[in-house]
Amino acid sequence: MTVRPATTVRPEPVEGLSFSSAARRRAGLRQAQPERRFWLTFFVAAALLVPALALSGCGLRPLYEGGGNGRVAQSLRTVEVGPIGGRAGWMVRTALIDRLQAPEGAQARYRLEVELDDRITGFGIRSDDAVTRERRTLRARYRLIDAARGTVLVDATAGSDAGIDVVSSEYATVAAEQTALERLSREIADQIVSRVALYAARTTQAQQ
């Protein structure tokens, strides 16, 4: 098994292979199976829905009461996303901003800091040294910080991965790895926003 940081979308040589032979054998990404995306969405939604149902049963307000005008949504719009390095960082930051919907130029109550680890692991190497499968893994450690006091309010992690079937086209490999990164970035952003929303809901309830 070989592991390499995914700091670029161009394919890197697998250890023990020349670039040309690796490039001929490493190619193409088939998108992770649709079932995987469904279950990820299901579990993220369940993480929010279960507490909401529990609160409703106790006579308390559900997580997203009021929709876009509710207290949780208003809290999310006060979160500023700090810079995140690299191509993956740009994608994750863009996805976070889209979901948080903070008005441009507004004073932030919270600051969100994110560190990423983006790797592509090659495995399934045949006797002729050809890699038959890869996995792209994106991991994030994120902190929600009180902008005024500098206090860390949430310190957590998020992660997701996508399988890559290696075929014969170098161009297909580059395009497919890029597609995988785009999908993983959205999934990481969903996980982070879900956790921040849960914190906002708990804080709102404690203040009432």
Image: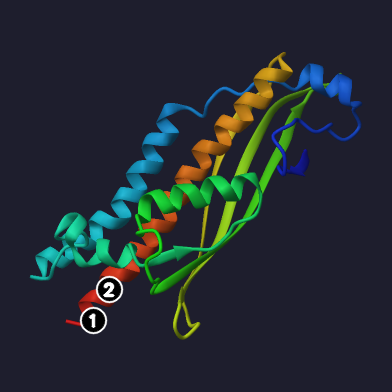
Residue farthest to the top? Answer: 168
Q: Please tell me in which quadrant of the rendered image residue 176 appears.
A: top right
The answer to whether one can see residue 138 in this image is no
Secondary structure, mark 2, is helix
Q: CA distance from mark 2 to mark 1?
A: 6 Å
Position of 193 relative to 87 (above/below): below
The residue at 20%/61% (across/down) is 52
* Quadrant of the rendering where the C terminus is positioned: bottom left
The answer to whether one can see residue 5 in this image is yes
For label 1, the crowd category at 10 Å Cα-Cα, with few meaning under 14, some 14 to 19 and many 20 or more, is few
The residue at 12%/64% (across/down) is 56
For label 2, the crowd category at 10 Å Cα-Cα, with few meaning under 14, some 14 to 19 and many 20 or more, is few
Residue sitting nearer the eye, 149 or 198: 149
Marks 2 and 1 in Cβ contact (< 8 Å): yes
Which residue position holds label 2? 202
Position of 110 relative to 123 (above/below): below
